[in-house]
Image (cartoon, rainbow, N blue to C red):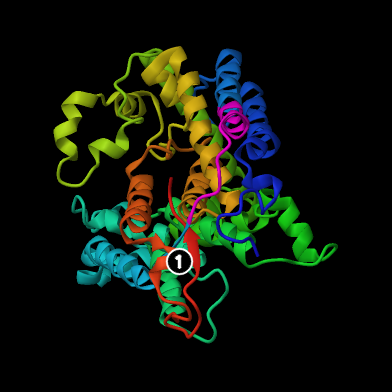
């Protein structure tokens, strides 16, 4: 186990390093999608993507990798002083997430007949989405579950003995997120919970012997996750679209799943290129970059006039795009907002990811949690601009508040021999710097 506060005591895997993840997985995936778009593409009506956009996107991803590498090389940091957290913070995060889910699913709970109609194929996804509860600052508390998952592993760096309420909380949050994913077609919500869980398991729990199957799967990282991803997509789409429509178009469900998954990436990248083609480079207000600010609870709307009320992407999508495939990619929207300066923004993204990776390796409690959250955004960057989104802001802000306001220096948190809720000493975790 990595001792808290000991820098670089954990070497990890190639895929938890943002720079290597970009160079070894995301860039090759981007290259495959680019070749498909530049080839004889028949699934998309209008192709905006060309060689210029392919080069710009590659430079953006390389700038992120350079920023992540530069942070580690140019700004080494000393080990952080360990702090201790009470497990009771997990109780608070769990109930915050439950409040958010009650608001979000309140309409479905009140009208279960619509959900039953959706499950048997007589109602569409849009019918269910109309029942989704949206209260600014309350429904977004569902994202507290994204903070709960990594924080659980940081507080309990060794598994608690027996079944505890924190295990039960973890199970409940997984079930609620799974329901959210199926009912409201939010696959990203499930990824935001499952991927941090997998990362924290690899960081704090799994130490398979060399040569074992588990060691081989961990070494493969995201490549090993492709088959489960296809299986989840099939399960998610079976009632939603396969039985009601696509069963009459495709020969089998596996061909359907592979083509649809590819379309989610290719249409997102093509949508981003189309936005630049139609609206221009550097002509948009920075609404994607400052999404977290304008969605800030209560006071967010007051910042919208300062950031700009640009709705250029919606205009493009409704006029020139496909509302079914509506993702804009997390690359080209930044060229739309900043022009060539988007490469500088990419380097700053990389710097942030490099900082979180340094804390991840050193065992810093806050940065371990933050890295698990931020790496999801990097993994999804070809599809969605999630790094600066309000979805990320809620868990990161909650984690910062927990460590900043509730963390105490480990040596002074309790007298020698003080015990945790489970009869073991409270574990120190390093706080944010």
In the image shown, does 56 or 183 lie closer to the viewer? 56
Above or below, comparing residue 157 to residue 395 in the picture:
below
| Tally of marks | 1
Quadrant of the snapshot with the C terminus: top left
Would residue 311 appear left or right of 63 to someone viewing this image? Answer: left
Above or below 38: residue 199: below
Q: x, y (%) of residue 343?
A: 50, 19
Q: Residue at x 53, y 87 (%)?
A: 162
Would residue 127 be visible to someone looking at this image?
no
Q: Which residue corresponds to the image point at 61% horizontal and 61% vertical from the top-left?
A: 3
Where's residue 252, x and y in %? 64, 55
Q: Is residue 51 visible?
A: yes
Q: Quick one: label 1, few (<14), some, or many (20+) residues within 10 Å?
A: few
- Residue ID at (54%, 84%): 161
Quarter placement of the N terminus: bottom right
Query: From what the image shows, is residue 5 above or below residue 310?
Result: below
The residue under the point 39% across, 12% down is 280
Magenta-span inclusion, residue 75: yes
- The part of the image, by quadrant, that contains residue 388 is top left
Provide residue 199's location: percent of width, then percent of height: 58, 57
Magenta residue span = 64-81
Q: Is residue 340 left or right of residue 26?
A: left
Percent across and percent down for residue 260 are 56, 44
| Circle 1 SS class | helix
Which residue carries the number 1 mark? 411
Q: Is residue 227 magenta?
A: no
Q: Nearer the viewer, residue 331 or 230?
A: 331
Quarter of the view holding residue 111: bottom left
């Amino acid at each position: 186990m990595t001792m808290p506060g000991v820098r670089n005591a954990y070497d990890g895997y190639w895929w938890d390093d943002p720079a290597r993840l970009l160079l070894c997985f995301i860039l090759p995936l981007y290259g495959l999608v680019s070749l498909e778009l530049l080839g004889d593409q028949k699934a998309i009506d209008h192709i905006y993507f060309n060689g210029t956009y392919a080069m710009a996107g590659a430079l953006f991803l390389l700038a992120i990798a350079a920023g992540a590498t530069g942070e580690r090389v140019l700004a080494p940091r000393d080990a952080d002083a360990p702090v201790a957290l009470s497990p009771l913070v997990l109780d608070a995060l769990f109930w915050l997430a439950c409040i958010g889910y009650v608001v979000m699913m309140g309409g479905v709970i009140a009208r279960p007949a619509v959900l039953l109609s959706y499950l048997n194929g007589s109602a569409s996804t849009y019918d269910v989405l109309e029942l989704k509860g949206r209260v600014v600052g309350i429904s977004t508390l569902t994202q507290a579950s994204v903070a709960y998952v990594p924080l659980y592993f940081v507080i309990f760096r060794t598994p608690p003995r027996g079944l505890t309420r924190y295990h039960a909380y973890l199970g409940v949050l997984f079930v609620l997120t799974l329901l959210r994913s199926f009912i409201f077609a939010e696959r990203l919500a499930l990824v935001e919970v499952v991927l941090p869980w997998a990362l924290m398991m690899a960081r704090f729990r799994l130490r398979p012997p060399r040569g074992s199957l588990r060691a081989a799967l961990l070494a493969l990282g995201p490549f090993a996750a492709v088959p489960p991803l296809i299986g989840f997509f099939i399960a998610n789409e079976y009632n939603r679209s396969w039985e009601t429509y696509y069963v009459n178009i495709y020969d089998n469900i596996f061909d359907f799943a592979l083509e649809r998954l590819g379309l989610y990436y290719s249409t997102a990248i093509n949508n981003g290129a189309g936005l630049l083609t139609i609206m221009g480079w550097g002509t948009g207000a920075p609404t994607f970059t400052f999404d977290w600010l304008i969605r800030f609870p209560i006071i967010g709307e007051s910042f919208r006039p300062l950031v700009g009320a640009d709705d250029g992407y919606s205009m493009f999508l409704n006029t020139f795009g496909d509302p079914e495939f509506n993702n804009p990619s997390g690359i080209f929207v930044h060229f739309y907002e900043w022009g060539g300066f988007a490469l500088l923004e990419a380097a700053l993204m990389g710097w942030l990811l490099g900082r979180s990776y340094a804390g991840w390796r050193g065992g810093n409690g806050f940065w371990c949690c933050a890295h698990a959250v931020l790496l999801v955004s990097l993994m999804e960057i070809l599809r969605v601009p999630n790094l600066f989104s309000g979805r990320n802001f809620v868990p990161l802000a909650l984690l910062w508040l927990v460590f900043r306001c509730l963390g105490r220096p480990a040596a002074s948190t309790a007298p020698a021999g003080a015990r945790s809720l489970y009869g073991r000493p409270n574990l120190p975790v390093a706080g944010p710097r």
